[in-house]
Image (cartoon, rainbow, N blue to C red):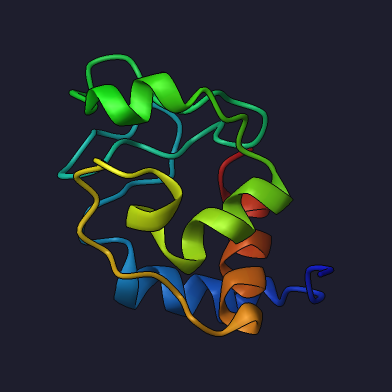
Amino acid sequence: MGIPEGDAAKGAKLFKTRCAQCHTLEKGGPNKVGPNLHGIMGRQSGQVEGFSYTEANKKKGVIWEEQTLFDYLENPKKYIPGTKMAFAGFKKPQDRADVIAHLKEATQ
């Protein structure tokens, strides 16, 4: 299934309400409960320096791009069994596409 066209402005709002309590986006931003996401596009899972990942996350070896993020953000615990990410996921495909559009802009 294809990924819907994302709206970065809507994604920014979703990120602020659903993701920002655990993740930062800016270059050099701190790790919180979750890792800083700057440079996520094209990066392998479990690679942010200074963040304590689960073995499951480190061993998944996925490269984060639109499709892998789209699949992951639907149900993180199903995509990476053993992850400590408590977020249940974005069930609506459009919400996932919007957040990904925001990440693509905000993490470069």
- Residue 58: x and y in percent read 36, 21
- Residue 29: x and y in percent read 32, 34
Q: Quadrant of the C terminus?
A: top right
Please give the name of the residue rendered at 46% of the width and 75% of the height, measured from the top-left corner: 90
Q: In this view of the protein, which residue sits in the foreground, 50 or 88?
A: 88
Q: Quarter of the image holding residue 97? A: bottom right
- Residue 93: x and y in percent read 63, 79
Q: Is residue 60 left or right of residue 6?
A: left
Q: Residue furthest top?
A: 49
- Residue 31: x and y in percent read 23, 34
**Vertical placement of 105 versus 14: above or below?**
above
Q: Is residue 4 left or right of residue 76?
A: right
**Vertical placement of 55 versus 107: above or below?**
above
Q: In this view of the protein, which residue sits in the foreground, 14 or 27?
A: 14
**Vertical placement of 42 versus 4: above or below?**
above
Please give the name of the residue rendered at 30% of the width and 70% of the height, measured from the top-left corner: 88
